[in-house]
Amino acid sequence: MSGRMRLPHGGQIDHNKPLSFTFNGRAYKGLAGDTLAAALLANGVHLVGRSFKYHRPRGIVTAGPEEPNALVQVGEDPRTDPNIKATQLELVEGLSAQPQNAWPSLEFDVGAVNTLAARLIPAGFYYKTFMWPVSAWKTYEHIIRRAAGLGRAPSQRDPDRYDKTYAYCDVLVVGAGPAGLAAALAAGRSGARVVLVEQDHLLGGALLSAAEEMIDGQAALDWVRAAETELSQMANVRILRRTIAYGAFDHGFFGLMENVTDHLAEPPAELPRHRLWKLRAKQAVFCAGAIERPLVFADNDRPGIMTASSVQSYINRYAVRPGKRAVVFTNNDSGYGAALDMTAAGIEVVAVIDLRSAPSGPLTERAEAAGLRILAEHAIIGTAGRKRVTKVRVAELAVEGDAVVGAVEEIDCDLIANSGGWSPTVHLFCHAKGSLNWDEEHACFVPDKAMQAGQRCAGSANGAFGLGSCLAEGAEAGTAAAAEAGFQAGAAVTVESEDRDFLPGRWIWLVPSDKPLGQKAKHFVDQQNDVTAADLKLALREGYVSIEHVKRYTTTGMATDQGKLGNVNAIGIVAEEFGRPLPEVGVTTFRPPFTPVSFGIFGGRDVDDLLDPLRRTPMHAWHERNGALFEDVGQWRRPWYYPQFGEDMHTAVNREVKAVRQSLGILDASTLGKIDIQGPDAAEFLNRVYTNAWKKLDIGRCRYGLMLGEDGMVTDDGVTTRLGENHFLMTTTTGNAAAVLSHLEDYLQTEWPDLKVFLTSVTEQFATITLSGPNARKLLAELSDAELSPNALPHMGYTAARVAGVPARIFRISFTGELSYEINVPASFGMAVWQTVMTVGERYGITPYGTEAMHVLRAEKGYIIVGQETDGSVNPLDLDMGWAVSKTKDFIGKRSLTRADMLKPDRKQLVGILTQDPQEVLPEGAQLVEQVLPQPPMPMLGHVTSSYYSPNCGRSIAMALVKGGLARKGETLYAPLEGGKTVACVVAESPVFFDPAGERLK
Amino acid sequence: MLLISCPHCGPRCESEFANGGEAHIERPKDPETLSDADWAEFVFFRDNPKGLVLERWNHAQGCRRWFNAARDSVTYEILAVYPMGSPPPALDPKRYV
């Protein structure tokens, strides 16, 4: 038996397929086709959680994505998901779910004392109470966040896989209810590529929950099956089930989340759990249906109080009786549908309480004919029952509908089905910035104009609530969408059905009670966030006028259900209180996602090693074999240092640094950006993009250049070589190569299209091996046919030759201050040449060095690194590099260098820093002050940009950007460090700490 | 995610493109003759209109070519794409107050 409240037959479930599951630690049975909510109700379980703020017992309210209460924690850590709606969760064998927000247990919750203290926790409580002192908020916040929150996040990384895919279609149809099916059929028959998206695993929408709708003279679900069969057979139609269209974005772009395996007890290993569809649709038809609103009455949140249509859903779709003795509370005709379906299912309907003074409508009349007790112009003014509703208190409405009069009748019941009217599901339409109109008659917001071309709503999502209208509108919208996408209509979709609306209705937003509002009873507007009508009125009394502010202050509509049930009621109550027409109050902004989506889909496969492309140099395997530790530089992975025989980093780097100065080091510099520049105007182009002069650079010579933005700030530097009259090779910093290339392309294409220049990235075409140290020339001479004498190949000279038998470009440039050669060979020869160099170099004690040693070596020479010494606010003069700035020609950013701001004497300028204690190494980023005060704040002069221990200088060295630094040489400054320590240091005469005359470069 | 028609490659997702800001801002021919204020106008100041914007785009992940586009900053509708150096085509943009 799958539960004592299960009907013996009927519904869209398999009575022969029982499934076991647990909830709150207890074992239950359900049926295949159930949602968790349906299976719980079949077992008579209504109490499923505690509310967010007051910890009140809460039950299942709906049968769909609008559910505010039945949020459960599913699965076991790490495969666990919080805040899953039991009303959407398909039952699967072995499912384990836990209630949330209940401690120590669902039945006995300590937090429920909040209910008693409710008058002490009004709207905006946290804002009001925890504002002072401001500095304590961090402490408060920590505690509040722990007490609040619904489910628990997994404690370990997600073991499941997720996927992403792109898709394109002519017509997207969202929702496979009657309107959506008609639209998909019409569009599909035209030959257009159609994607039909349905959040449920069954097509049919509201028809799945209806008792006895007819379409074209046959049972509605037979028509649904025929439509599904026809659509499945069309090659141009894709049906995505269990897929939520969670957001509509610009230019017909949609986000869909497909649930691929959650409904499978044993998911196949090859399938991802969820899949993100990034869909571009030329045309879209939104057929997302409508959501029934609950009524806002006193204590309307007890378990057993459900929307009328969801009661119908549980009876008709799931063959479950949600109660035995029911009261219906309605303000419109559709509530009577629940009364009739419950009667048919054997649930005793003891009374229908109708706010209308003269109930009428097709279902009302049938209920009257069936002899149901109807109390017209009456209201439920209170309910009783702790973990389940046990009775209602009913009284007659005053004529105005804002108070009750006369005697109070108490009626015993275990179920209240209530209906406050219907709201079209306009979310996607509004994500895409469609505008809404207020439909006075139906009391709901309906789509007005789509902002994006090719988007439209149909059916009850469009405010057409009758089944006949839904079918007709769907067919029409599908035909129109296909036509606009350029397809001729196929066979017409003509279907006939009854066209029953839910009118007439009487719209009372706040059902009166015999007690003052907010006293001894709560009128819940937003059950998930525990927002009551009294909270809304309090916000208005406190001066909040905009509905957006009311929302944020009270948090109404801000929970995971995003106000699908409560928002229109909240707007109605606010409008009434202000005495303004409801559309004037307006709606809050609809934002994606429609329902929560898993984080996993946005990562998809782009996690771990696939997060970002990893770039390795041709010699990477050698570095690995030789024990290099690596550091990431942009996407590149570079050797950081090569520890030997258990060396720590400090020892290894010192050894590498000394080896370069004493004999010979070798560096893999392949990652340096290389841009090949060709064309008759190449020299002129360089002249405009670099700060110094380029036109007279001789062939075979290299030059260092600084690149600025138009704001005058340094953006990159590097050495560029003239390979031929019209041919240059530019090098850029490793991390900046792509940015420099696009910067150059920008100017070339947009400012100076007259210049005949081509730019080509050749970074990965060459492997670059840097030999540096006093023995560099000797080694290279053994391996190369190049003429290497200082006269033939001087510092900043270039020659093409063979190295280790391979055609090579040899640049005599230095980033260490030593005699240095940068050798470019075709990338495919990089490893072979490197290995040859290593073998032959053994006799010179050739030492591979990594980026850390490179940094120390360049810092000893005061060479800057763009991005370390500069941060986008540093110009060449700040770097004391005026020598590299031409006074005579224009270049990008030149004019900015004479702006008043750039000439201020207190600009931060780059200086060398020497600590008084030579063994003390300042941390990079340390702030420098003139005078140490007992505690912060104290005036800060600047900060340390580079700091190392220099084995060649035998002491620590540093560079810093200091206000007016160039005029402070010899001054003593202080670096107050964390923990109260202060380091005294002196502004050096020059940031060049080693070989200031440059003798070693000669 | 915008759908942008590269004049050379056809319609592509926005993620292939880089936006280059306001179009038709020509680099001054002789910057040294400009006042600080006029130069700052060129370097720092941009319009932010509601409605028609003319802006530069680069098909960075495609053909790497720059082009201009006319876009409505309210609806995000792209009204035209046109080559660098050309004046914008005749348009009848929506007016917003």
Image: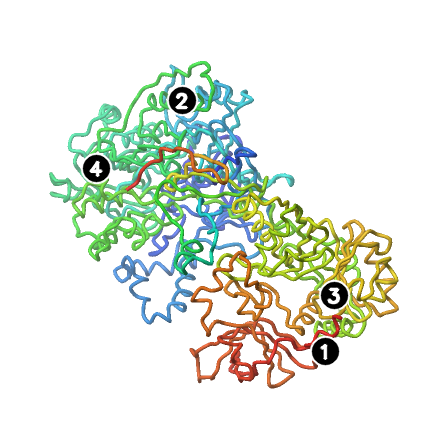
Give the CA separation, mark 3 to mark 2. Answer: 74 Å
**Mark 1, residue position:** A952
Give the CA separation, mark 4 to mark 1. Answer: 86 Å
Specify few, some or many for label 2: CA neighbours under 10 Å numbering under 14, 14-19, or 20 or more.
many
In the rendered image, is residue A951 in sight? yes
> Which of the labelled discs sits on residue A795, or is there none?
3
**Mark 2, residue position:** A480
The amino acid on which the numbered mark 2 sits, given as a three-letter code, is Ala
**Mark 4, residue position:** A507
Task: Say whether disc 3 or disc 4 marks the residue closer to the N-terminus.
Answer: 4
Give the CA separation, mark 2 to mark 4. Answer: 35 Å
State left or right for residue A570 relative to residue A201. left
Query: Mark 3 or mark 4: which is in front?
Result: 3
Q: Position of residue B90 (x, y in %)?
A: 39, 33
Quadrant of the image occupied by residue A502:
top left
The amino acid on which the numbered mark 1 sits, given as a three-letter code, is Asn
> Which of the labelled discs sits on residue A923, or is there none?
none
The answer to whether marks 2 and 1 mark residues whose Cβ atoms lie closer than 8 Å is no
